């Protein structure tokens, strides 16, 4: 029974995505909405992403330094492992999990509130494709902004790693920088971008979907918001595995 | 004119509307009354296309709305204005932008013309100096007026009002009623009002439809209600202290 419900919702999700695919009524309105959403998702998440990235980098340096205690392991490897783990996994995945909580709940509650207060009905009666008007700008803004935030998070996590390495005396800055530059594979950044685009799409579309199918009142808006975060996180983790399996197999 | 014929609507096994046929006339305030759960809101939602009917026809000036595709329905919807029970003003937009929304979306008016039209609509509903206020900072009566101003912004042919007086004090209720009546006559609109408010009905109702348990139970003019001999309608009136 539970799986039937899951597949039913999955079907509705794809129909919902299909409904988005129409030409925006007015391109200048669409552009304005997209810029507003980019401001809300991007600038609005700048602080939390900065904080998370610095500490993720800092903690990864301390933990890797703690585990690589053998005198046979060159010290610069700490920098290299911090670089790869942050670029390949921590920055895209942790940042997007945090954004699923912040941006996803905000999108679901905004659209859910509009649904229960009949604002979406008002759009439909005016002849506006409400899904296209409300959701498409959020997805476009998310797909543009979230990869930029992830790129910023990558840089900041390495800075955080360097600071914590130096402050705690685990590694000196020259070795850390040597580690960052050692055997760098640019594909890692490309891989991280693929993940970011996918996660951005999941966060914005899944959250919009849950907001859009809200029915009832304030309680249901809260429930939709929770579901949006839970399903976005599940989607991120699932596709993290799929993308890693597809691109990182040797 | 709007004509609905043989409308059926059910949710799963529950029949909500059964064989509803009625005509809603131009330049008239057409009332749909009935107890909560009788199906009048579902009828209104079916008429504006927010719900699909199971069977039947809804004709806007001779065009069957039910058989149209999404894009064709959009064209008819541009001729519809709707005042929602909870006003449904967009929270994120101020009063001016709420009223300007359909104008910016569907007309090629210049920004100056849009503002001119917004001010005209606001003036028409007796509101001034509220352009930059947000819906959260205005009273319920003002919200209703802004809702009416938004509904008439595109000069609609059809105006739907869902419980226009709910949550308003008696004086504001009468002002909203008068406004709807004036606008209906002034712009030659076909107005459909869903209400429980019998005072509104006796003040401005031209054509009345009474829905009882999903069926059209009675139809006529307000003058004929008391002499209708229809038990359910008379009970409904008595319960409303009329």
Image (cartoon, coloured by chain):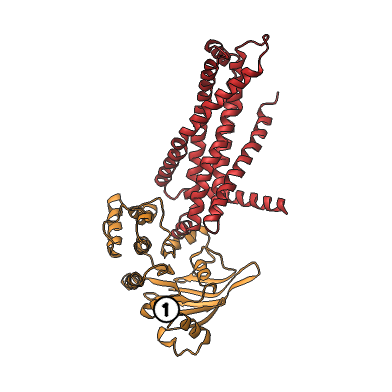
Q: Which residue is mark 1?
A: B198
* Residue drawn where x is 50% and y is 46% of the image: A107
Q: Is residue B82 visible?
A: yes
Mark 1 falls within which chain? B
The residue positioned farthest toward the right in the image shown: A1
Q: Considering only vertical position in the picture, is B162 above or below A105?
A: below
The residue positioned farthest toward the front in the image shown: A168
Residue B138 image point, x, y percent: 34, 58
Residue A149 image point, x, y percent: 50, 31
Q: Which chain is orange?
A: B
* Residue drawn where x is 26% and y is 59% of the image: B128
| Colour that chain A carries in the picture | red
Residue B205 image point, x, y percent: 39, 78
* Residue drawn where x is 67% and y is 50% of the image: A6
Q: Quadrant of the C terminus of chain B?
A: bottom left
Q: Is residue B64 visible?
A: no
Residue B145 image point, x, y percent: 34, 64
Q: Quadrant of residue B188?
A: bottom left
């Amino acid at each position: 029974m539970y799986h039937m419900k899951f597949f039913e919702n999955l079907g509705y999700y794809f129909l919902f995505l299909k409904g988005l695919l129409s030409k925006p009524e007015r391109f200048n309105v669409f552009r304005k909405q997209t810029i507003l959403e980019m401001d809300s998702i991007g600038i609005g998440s700048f602080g939390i992403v900065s904080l998370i990235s610095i500490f993720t980098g800092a903690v990864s340096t301390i933990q890797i330094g703690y585990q690589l205690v053998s005198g046979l392991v060159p010290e610069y490897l700490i920098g290299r492992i911090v670089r790869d783990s942050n670029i390949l996994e921590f920055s895209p995945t942790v940042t997007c999990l945090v954004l699923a909580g912040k941006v996803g709940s905000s999108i679901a509650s905004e659209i859910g509130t509009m649904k229960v207060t009949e604002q979406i009905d008002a759009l439909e009666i005016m002849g506006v494709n409400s899904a296209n008007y409300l959701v498409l700008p959020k997805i476009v803004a998310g797909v543009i902004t979230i990869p930029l935030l992830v790129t910023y998070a990558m840089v900041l996590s390495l800075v955080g790693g360097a600071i914590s390495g130096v402050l705690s005396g685990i590694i000196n800055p020259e070795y850390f920088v040597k580690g960052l530059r050692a055997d760098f594979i640019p594909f890692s950044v490309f891989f991280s971008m693929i993940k970011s685009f996918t996660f951005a799409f999941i966060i914005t579309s899944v959250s919009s979907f849950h907001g859009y199918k809200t029915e009832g009142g304030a309680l249901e808006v809260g429930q939709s918001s929770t579901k949006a975060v839970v399903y976005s996180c599940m989607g991120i983790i699932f596709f993290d595995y799929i993308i890693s399996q597809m691109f990182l197999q040797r | 004119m709007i004509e609905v014929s043989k409308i059926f609507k059910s949710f799963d096994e529950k029949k909500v509307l059964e064989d509803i046929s009625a005509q809603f006339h131009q330049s008239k305030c057409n009332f749909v009354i009935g107890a909560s759960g009788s199906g009048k809101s579902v009828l209104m939602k079916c008429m504006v296309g927010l719900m699909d009917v199971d069977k039947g026809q809804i004709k806007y000036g001779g065009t069957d709305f039910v058989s149209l595709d999404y894009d064709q329905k959009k064209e008819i919807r541009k001729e519809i204005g709707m005042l929602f029970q909870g006003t449904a003003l967009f929270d994120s937009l101020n009063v001016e932008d709420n009223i300007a929304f359909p104008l910016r979306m569907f007309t090629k008016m210049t920004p100056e013309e849009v503002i001119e039209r917004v001010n005209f609509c606001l003036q028409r509903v007796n509101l001034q100096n509220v352009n930059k206020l947000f819906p959260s900072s205005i009273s319920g009566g003002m919200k209703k007026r802004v809702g009416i101003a938004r509904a008439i912004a595109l000069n609609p042919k059809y105006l739907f009002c869902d419980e226009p007086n709910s949550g308003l004090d008696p004086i504001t209720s009468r002002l909203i009623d008068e406004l709807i009546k004036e606008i209906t006559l002034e712009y030659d609109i076909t107005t459909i009002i869903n209400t429980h408010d019998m005072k509104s009905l006796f003040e401005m109702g031209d054509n009345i439809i009474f829905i009882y348990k999903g069926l059209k139970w009675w139809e006529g003019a307000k003058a004929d209600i008391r002499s209708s001999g229809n038990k359910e309608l008379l009970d409904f009136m008595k319960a409303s202290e009329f």
